[in-house]
Image (spheres, helix red, strand yellow):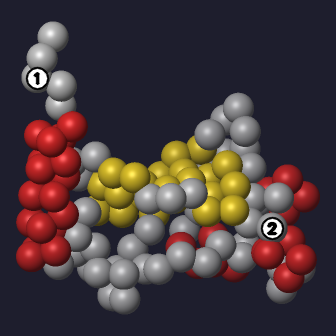
Amino acid sequence: MVNSDLISRIEYSEKYNDENYEYRHVIMPKELAKSLPRSTLMSEQEWRNAGIQMSRGWQHFMIHRPERHIFLFRRALGTDPLSGKVDPELERQAKDQYRTYLEDNTNVEA
C-alpha cells in the first residue's frame, strides 16, 4: 500500500481538451515517482495502485522525460466517467462545445 502522506501530495491539473481528447496531468511527489515505471506507460491498475485517483476512462499516454514525476493522461471526449466508455451523445455534445469555444475565441480581425 502506498503511504497516505505521499498520496495526499499528488496534484491534479485542470482538464483541457482538443477536438478528440480531454487531457490532464498528474504531478507525483518525487519520492513516489521513483518507484514507478520510468520507460513504460502504466495500465489503469498500475496508476491506481500508485495512488492516482481519477474517474474511469483515463489512459496514461505519454512520458514527460524532462520531469518524470509528471504523468500525462487523456481520454476520448464523451467518455462516461462512471463506466469509462465513450457515450456517442456525450461525445457529440463535447465536440460541439469545443467547436463553439473555438469559434467564439478566434480573433477574426487582423
Amino acid type at image mark 1: Val
Circle nearer the N terminus (2, 1) = 2
Amino acid type at image mark 2: Arg
Where 54 sits versus 95, above or below?
below
Task: Tell me residue 3's x, y (percent).
Answer: 89, 79
The residue lying furthest to the front in this view is 109
Residue density around tag 2, few if under 14, some if 14–19, many if 20 or more, within 10 Å:
few
Q: Which residue is mark 1?
A: 108
The alpha-carbon separation of the residues under discs 2 and 1 comes to 43 Å
**Image quarter for residue 9?**
bottom right
Q: Is residue 100 left or right of residue 10?
A: left
Residue at 28%, 73% in the rendered image = 79
Residue density around tag 1, few if under 14, some if 14–19, many if 20 or more, within 10 Å:
few
Task: Tell me residue 48's x, y (percent).
Answer: 63, 77
Q: Quadrant of the N terminus?
A: bottom right
Q: Is residue 35 left or right of residue 97?
A: right
Task: Tell me residue 37's x, y (percent).
Answer: 72, 56
Where 102 sits versus 51, above or below?
above
Residue at 37%, 88% in the rendered image = 82
Q: Quadrant of the C terminus?
A: top left
**Image quarter for residue 75?**
bottom left
Q: Which residue is mark 2?
A: 9
Q: Secondary structure at mark 1?
A: loop
Residue at 73%, 73% in the rendered image = 50
The residue lying furthest to the bottom in this view is 82
Tell me, for residue 58, which label it has, or none: none
